[in-house]
Image: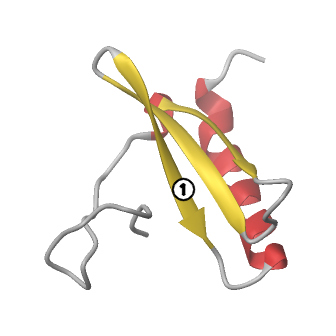
Amino acid sequence: MAASGAKGVDGGRKATTVHFSNVVGCKVMRKHPTTFKLVVYKATESKRYDFEAKTADEANEIVKELKKGISPYRDV
């Protein structure tokens, strides 16, 4: 999955790998239900990645799976 706005070789997008322990949070955007954001901690700052799914249901499913992946690293 490539972040919106990131340019690169493969299809005009750049891929990056982030460990679940570095994910600050993720959520579906209320105004645009097919768009979701992923906030990660990199070095000394947070970086936000915006993604677009085909449908609102797909966006919700992706966010659900991401939250499941980061839950072991979160203090709840």
Q: Which of these two is toward me, 18 or 27?
A: 27
Q: Give the quadrant of residue 30.
A: bottom right
Q: Give the quadrant of residue 29.
A: bottom right
Assign the C terminus to one quadrant of the image.
Answer: top right
Image-based side of 53 in relation to 59, left or right: left
Assign the N terminus to one quadrant of the image.
Answer: bottom left
Give the image location of residue 40, x and y in percent. Answer: 47, 34
Image-based side of 6 in relation to 51, left or right: left
Give the image location of residue 72, x and y in percent. Answer: 63, 31
Q: Residue at x 28, y 55 (%)?
A: 16
Q: Residue at x 84, y 76 (%)?
A: 57
The reply to whether residue 62 is visible in this rendering is no
Residue that badge 1 annotates:
50
Q: Which of these two is toward me, 66 or 25?
A: 25
Please, which colouring scheme is shown?
secondary structure
Q: Residue at x 84, y 58 (%)?
A: 31
Give the image location of residue 3, x and y in percent. Answer: 42, 61
Image-based side of 40 in relation to 76, left or right: left
Q: Residues within 10 Å of mark 1 (few under 14, many from 20)?
A: some
Q: Residue at x 68, y 35 (%)?
A: 71
* Amino acid type indicated by mark 1: Asp
- Element under disc 1: strand
Image-based side of 59 in relation to 19, left or right: right
Give the image location of residue 43, x and y in percent. Answer: 28, 20
The reply to whether residue 13 is visible in this rendering is yes
